[in-house]
């Protein structure tokens, strides 16, 4: 799988994970046109993984391994992204640097490489389990325990190497064709999601931003905004953060955090307009972005 294909896969899985969140499923799963296209995307992601496994398999049991690898990788990605949010909220750049992997880096690499990465994510999650659970990051001790079982299950299916028999050329063509199909599916899905742009704006923009961010590669933050109530200090969810120069909008997370990446904001001077119903708009000007550095800002919102 080449870099372009990896980025496309990362984009699909990022959006897939947001839509699969229990809090979001009720928004879209009652709309047949959206649900059917989402199911097609799910199937395409799985098929891509199976084809890639056959290309790289030297054990003779690619199908059995694929199922186990898909399960462990998806769980690693979900828990890993929860840890990313946790690390960002706690200004823990060391933890962030350890576990911020896009999906393809947890799925489409050598067996031992992904096992090592899964185990690292598991161990970091286990060490922070109480805070992840009580902090509302969607990760709890039973989920972490099940993740370890998934890792061990894949280890048991690794098998011993033997001569590879895959017709690599034909499989690479099949993989190329499936990525073309994934492109059509994701384009169609994004069109169908437009119906939620007004009534469920936060959900809509989060999914669309996931496609855009992961499609251009691994995320590296440039601007990190934390929104709080100026009087109580409570973090504010759903604040609209508009990057004026790029006309790019995002909504703050459950923990009141919005981020813009290095890819979205190359070196330069930027302005962010922040708005939330019931609060006075805030303009943050002259935000100087430098390559490789993160600008961290706390934005206090004043009630009207």
Image (cartoon, rainbow, N blue to C red):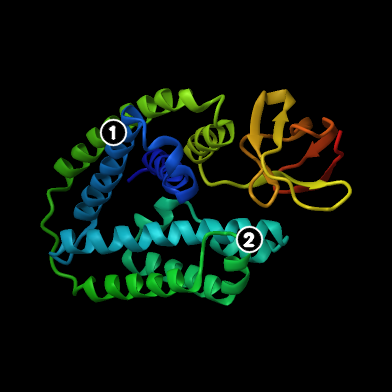
Q: Position of residue 287 (x, y in %)?
A: 82, 36
| Numbered-mark total | 2
Left or right of 260 in this view: 121: left
Mark 1 or 2, which is nearer the eye?
A: 1
The x and y percentages for residue 144 are 45, 71
Q: Which of the 4 image quarters holds residue 181?
A: top left
The foreground one among 56 and 116 is 116
Mark 2 element type: helix
Assign the C terminus to one quadrant of the image.
Answer: top right
Q: Is residue 289 left or right of residue 192?
A: right
Q: Report the front residue among 21 and 103.
A: 21
User: Looking at the image, can residue 100 be seen?
Assistant: no
Residue at the image point whose x is 55% and y is 58% from the top: 82
Closer-to-camera residue (52/73): 73
The residue identified by callout 2 is 86
Q: Are marks 1 and 2 in contact (CB under 8 Å)?
A: no
Q: CA distance from mark 1 to mark 2?
A: 33 Å
Whole-percent x, y for residue 50 in the image: 22, 51
Which secondary structure, mark 1? Answer: helix
Position in image of residue 283 (x %, y %): 84, 30
Q: Earlier in the sequence, mark 1 or mark 2?
A: 1
Q: Is residue 66 above or below residue 302?
A: below
The answer to whether 106 is drawn above or below residue 149 in the figure is above
The quarter holding residue 132 reads: bottom right
Q: Nearer the viewer, residue 296 or 97?
A: 296
Which residue is disc 1 drawn over?
A: 36
Q: Residue at x 73, y 24 (%)?
A: 245
């Amino acid at each position: 799988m080449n870099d372009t294909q990896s980025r496309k896969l990362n984009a699909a899985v990022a959006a897939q994970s947001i839509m699969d969140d229990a809090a979001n499923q009720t928004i879209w799963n009652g709309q047949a046109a959206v649900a059917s296209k989402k199911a097609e995307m799910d199937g395409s992601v799985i098929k891509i993984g199976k084809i890639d496994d056959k290309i790289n398999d030297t054990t003779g049991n690619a199908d059995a391994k694929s199922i186990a690898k898909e399960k462990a990788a998806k769980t690693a990605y979900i828990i890993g992204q929860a840890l990313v949010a946790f690390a960002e909220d706690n200004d823990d750049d060391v933890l962030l640097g350890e576990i911020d992997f896009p999906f393809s880096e947890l799925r489409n690499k050598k067996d031992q490489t992904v096992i090592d990465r899964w185990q690292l994510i598991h161990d970091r999650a286990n060490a922070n389990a109480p805070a992840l659970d009580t902090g509302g990051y969607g990760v709890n001790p039973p989920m972490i325990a099940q993740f370890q079982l998934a890792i061990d299950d894949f280890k048991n299916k690794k098998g011993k190497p033997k001569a590879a028999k895959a017709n690599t050329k034909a499989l690479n063509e099949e993989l190329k064709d499936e990525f073309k199909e994934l492109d059509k599916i994701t384009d169609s899905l994004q069109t169908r999601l437009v119906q939620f742009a007004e009534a469920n704006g936060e959900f809509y923009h989060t999914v669309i931003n996931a496609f855009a961010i992961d499609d251009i590669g691994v995320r590296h933050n440039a601007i990190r905004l934390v929104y709080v109530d100026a009087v109580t200090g409570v973090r504010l969810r759903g604040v609209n953060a508009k990057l004026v120069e790029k006309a790019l909008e995002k909504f703050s997370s459950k923990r009141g955090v919005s981020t813009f990446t290095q890819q979205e904001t190359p070196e330069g001077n930027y302005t962010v307009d922040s708005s939330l119903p019931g609060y006075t708009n805030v303009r943050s000007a002259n935000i100087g972005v430098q390559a490789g550095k993160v600008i961290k800002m706390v934005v206090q919102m004043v009630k009207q």
